[in-house]
Amino acid sequence: MPCRISDTDTSSGRYQLSVRIGNWVEENCLEEDKIVNFKNQRDRGELLVLKARTLYDNFHKEIVLAAPKQNIIFGAVVQLMPIVMNIKDLDSDDLNAALSVVINERMVRNSQTITEECELSVAPSRRPCARNSFRIVSGDGLDRTGETIKYGQRFRLQCMASEHDPIMVFSGSKRCNLQQGINVSYSSHKNGELNLNLGLVHQSKCSPKNDIPTAYTNWFCRHVDPKRRFESEGEDIPSNSPLVIVHATTNRNLAAENVVIQTLFGPEFLVSVQNYRNIYRHEIWKNVWMISNGYQTSKSNSSSH
């Protein structure tokens, strides 16, 4: 006898509440599989919430800076901090911004530590930690640990990650088609020109055979006053004092941009490699930094930039 519509209507009252209808066996099996997969991922630490917690723990791991000294030395763990962030309605003294490593969202599932895929920004720094601290090493490949760094002397910045194959901060010139050689999530412009980006690379990958020469990881410092740069060449670099950090290959300055970006760690600022000068050829606040090792000094000259 053919079925009538009323016989198959699940909304009818011919079945008691205890009667199961539909694909209830399959639904139960799917729910059980979800629970089993969830427990397995939890035990292996593969849940996104666990990875995010591990990421925050690794990036915010407390770092002890170098012993406070009046001058910066090779081998010291330091922070690179803009002297001032001249942005409307923002108190830069409370911000305490510093050059920091930031991971983009697409990499969270693959890695929870500092890698080459990470990017750089200027972020609030409540205390020195793994993401906003760097070790200064010599740019000529020699071990100069303990020596004082001079104005004009090349140095490199190592992330606080693997010491076996250090990760270096680098930048580079544009390609022949004027495209960036470093892929980042955000970019900035000056008068319509695309600014150079910052990137990270393992030291073992810096060689003439690779796309990133070792020279791309070299930086040096200039005196903040252009009139004193010639006479200050070769003098010791003081800690916590205004200076200009220059990329040796492109001869462009490290720059803190007044562009806010949203990251996994909250709102931060873009950082680039670009020269920003006023009509008197003096670097403005975007190009004025200090290298901090915990030594307390005055910032009385910072407001003028």
Image: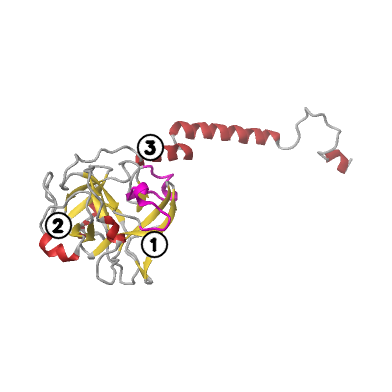
Secondary structure state at the residue bearing disc 3: helix
Q: Horizontally, is 74 left or right of 272 in the view? A: left
Query: In the picture shown, does residue 205 fall above or below 13?
Result: below
What is the magenta range? Answer: 86-112
Q: CA distance from mark 3 to mark 2?
A: 36 Å
Identity of the residue drawn at 22% across and 52% down: 241
Which label is found at residue 57? 3
Task: Judge whether residue 110 can be spotted in this image.
Answer: yes
Secondary structure state at the residue bearing disc 1: loop
Task: Judge whether residue 171 can be spotted in this image.
Answer: no
Q: Residues within 10 Å of mark 1 (few under 14, many from 20)?
A: some
The residue at which mark 1 appears reads as: 187
Which label is found at residue 294? none
The residue at which mark 2 appears reads as: 151
Q: Are marks 1 and 2 in contact (CB under 8 Å)?
A: no
- What residue occupies the far top of the structure in this picture? 18
Q: CA distance from mark 1 to mark 3?
A: 28 Å
Q: CA distance from mark 1 to mark 2?
A: 29 Å
What type is the residue that disc 2 sits on? Tyr
N-terminal-most mark, 1 or 3: 3
Identity of the residue drawn at 17% across and 50% down: 238
Q: Position of residue 63 (x, y in %)?
A: 28, 38
N-terminal-most mark, 1 or 2: 2
Task: Confirm whether the magenta stretch covers residue 87.
Answer: yes
Secondary structure state at the residue bearing disc 2: loop
Please name whichever residue, 224 or 106, is drawn nearer the observer in this view of the structure. 224
What type is the residue that disc 1 sits on? Ser
Please name whichever residue, 214 or 236, is drawn nearer the observer in this view of the structure. 236
What type is the residue that disc 3 sits on? Asp
Q: Horizontally, is 151 left or right of 110 in the view? A: left
Query: In the picture shown, does residue 121 fall above or below 277?
Result: above
